[in-house]
Structures are given as C-alpha cells and as structure tokens.
Image (tube, rainbow, N blue to C red):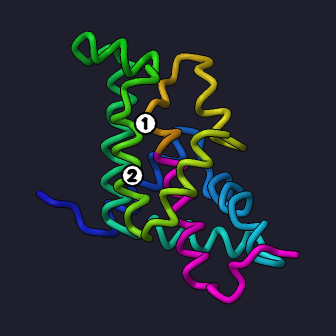
Amino acid sequence: MVKSSNELHQKALELLDKRGVKLTDIAELVLFLQTPYIKDLTVDECLANVEAVLLKREVQNTILTGVQLDILAEQNALMNPLQDIITDDEGLYGIDEILALSIVNVYGSIGFTNYGYIDKIKPGILAKLNSHEGDEVHTFMDDIVGAIAAAAASRLAHANPSQSELVK
C-alpha cells in the first residue's frame, strides 16, 4: 500500500536523523552555497527552503531508496560486485549521483551547478558523510544531502532573483 505524503515525509526525516544528518546541517550547506549571491542570508531562511524541498515526494522517495541501499551495504546484503562497489563508494559507480540528480531536477538547471560544486568540495556534513570512517556506509546519503542542499539553494535563488547577483 502506498504511504500518504505525510507518512513518507516523516519517514524521510526520521531516516536523515538516524543517519546523523540534521536539517540545520543541510541549511548550513545552503548558506555556504548562497551567501556569495544573497546579501544578509540567514540559516533560518536556508532551513525554510530545506524544509520545502523535503516536502517533495520525489525527494522523499530518493531518501528512502538511497538510505535502504546504504543499509543493505552495511549488512553485506547485496550481491557482489555491487556489494563491494557500494561499500567502497567506488568513484566510477555514479549511480549514487544519478539518484541524487532526481532531487536536483526539481528546481531547474541552477541545481546542477550547485550540486556539482558542493559534491566536488564536500563542505560541512558532506565531509563527515564521505569520510568512510566507521561501519556506516553513506555512498548514497552524501549525494542525497548534497542534492537537497543544492535544490534548496536553487529554490532560494529562484525566490530572490533581484538579490541573486554577486554581493559586492
């Protein structure tokens, strides 16, 4: 049976939290992305945009799918060579990024550039998720979190077109 939007939303929020990601962590990524372009931007404004992105069913479905794959990898429940590819977060795998792009697509082409940039430099919570320390696998989670931040930054830019010029 298909879950209601509220049930999916709550489950997505629960999974982010259980995987060590706070919404403020994502809001800080949005702030990082948009501070050069929007004067006097606050974490609260960024958080509101993160929360709006998380209301999208496509985003909720992506979180559920990616987290499930990460958990299955932690449990050694995937067939090889997929098990090793996901556990090792193999650089040429790319499916983790493709899944994340379903989130980025929600707010247009600016999301692609935001996502590519933040995925490359991995600031804040992304560095922690990508560290490969401990027993947890975050092959999908780091890309999903980066994509949520990129989408929220894009949403923010679209809502503030007159402010989205380089701050001088």
Identified by mark 2, the residue type is: Leu
Magenta residues? 144-168
Counting from the top left corner in percent of width and height, residue 52 is at: 49, 73
Q: Going by the picture, which residue comes out furthest to the bottom? A: 162
Residue 65: % across, % down: 30, 43
Identify the residue at image location x=55%, y=67%: 152
Is residue 118 found inside the magenta-colored segment of the image?
Answer: no
Tell me, for residue 140, which label it has, or none.
1
* Distance (Cα) linking label 1 and label 2: 11 Å
**Mark 1 and mark 2 residues within 8 Å of each other at the beta carbon:** no
* Quadrant assignment, res 87: top left
Q: Helix, strand, or loop for circle 2?
A: helix
**Mark 1: few, some, or many residues within 10 Å (few <14, many ≥20)?**
many
Q: Quadrant of residue 120?
A: top right
* Residue 75 sits in quarter: top left
**Closest to the observer, 155 or 46:** 155
Q: Earlier in the sequence, mark 1 or mark 2?
A: 2
- Three-letter amino acid code at disc 1? Phe
- Residue that badge 2 annotates: 101
Camera-near label (1 vs 2) is: 2
- Image vertical order of residue 91 relative to residue 117, above or below: above
Instruction: From the viewer's perspective, tell me whether residue 4 is left or right of residue 85.
Output: left
> Where's residue 157, x and y in %?
60, 76
User: Residue at image x 57%, y 72%?
Assistant: 49
Per the picture, the main secondary structure of the magenta-coloured stretch is: helix
126 sits to left or right of 12: right
**Which residue reaches farthest left?**
1
The mark tally for this picture is 2
